[in-house]
Amino acid sequence: MQRPRGRQFLPVRPDEEHRINRQIRVPQVRLIGAKGEQLGVVATEDALRLAQEAEVDLVEVAPAAQPPVCRLLDYGKFRYSKQKKEAEAKKKQHVTQLKELRVRPGTDEHDLERQLKKAQEFLTDGQRVKFTLRFRGREMAHQQLGREKLLKVAEQLSDISWIEIEPRTEGRVMNLVLAPGSRKKLTPGAPAAAPAKVGAPTSGAPSAGAAPRPAAAGAAKPEAPPAG
C-alpha cells in the first residue's frame, strides 16, 4: 500500500514541549537570534533558512503569542541543559514518605526493640512512621493496653520525633503516626504579673507603718477648724 504523497506533517512527540523546524506551520514568526537579538517578524521560510545557515534549529518558544515567538538555537544542547537542571532540582527535593511498622499487644521486648531501631532509621532519614497495632479476638476488650504500648513507643522515640496523630482505633487496628523532628513550641512571653494579695495596698496608697511622704512644694495646706 502506497503512502499518500504531499507535504509530510511532523507531529510533536509527547516528550517534546516545543515545535521545531518543519513542525512550525505558521506563515510568520517573531524571531530571536542565536545571541538573543531581536530580528522582528519574518516569514517562517526565511527563519528556517537562517537556522540552516547557522547550523542550528528554529524552536518555537512562545506558541500563544501573535505571531508565535521562535528562537535560533541548538535544540539538542537546549534539551540536555534543561534535563540536567531538572535532575539537579529533583535531587534537592525531599519527598516525605510514610513508613509502616506493625506491632501486637503481646509483642515481646526483643521484637519491639527491633521495630524501634527501624523507626529510628526512618525518622533520622526524615520519614514519617506509622505504627499499626492489630487486635485479635478477645484482645479488643483490652484496647487500653494497646494504647499504652503505642504511647510507650512514642515516648521512647520522643527525642527524634513528635506525635502527629494520637493512637486511635479503626476497626480492629489502632494507629499511631510519628513525624521526624520536634513540634515547634510557642515562644514564651513575658512572665505574668503575680496576682495582688487580698488586703494588700494599692500602688497609690501607703502601706501600714510606712513613713508619710512629704507634701509637694506649693501644695495647699489644709485649713484649721474654726475655734469654738
Image (tube, helix red, strand yellow):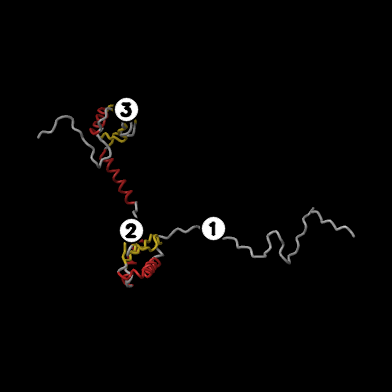
Work out how far the residue at label 1 is from the one at label 2, CA to CA, in angstroms.
Answer: 35 Å
Rendering quarter of residue 62 = top left
Which residue is at a point 37% across and 63% down the rendered structure image? 168
Circle 3 residue? 41
Question: Which residue is at the far left?
Answer: 1
Sequence order check, earlier mark of 1 and 2: 2
Residue 130 image offset from top left, x and y in percent: 34, 61
175 or 112: which is nearer to us?
A: 175
Q: Is residue 199 left or right of residue 155?
A: right
Circle 1 residue? 189
What amino acid type should be assigned to the residue bearing mark 3?
Val
Circle 2 residue? 98
From this view, report whether residue 138 is shown above or below residue 202. below
Q: Quadrant of the N terminus?
A: top left
Q: Nearer the viewer, mark 2 or mark 3?
A: 2
Rendering quarter of residue 171 = bottom left
Sequence order check, earlier mark of 1 and 3: 3
Residue 118 image offset from top left, x and y in percent: 32, 65
Which residue is at a point 72% across and 66% down the rendered structure image? 208
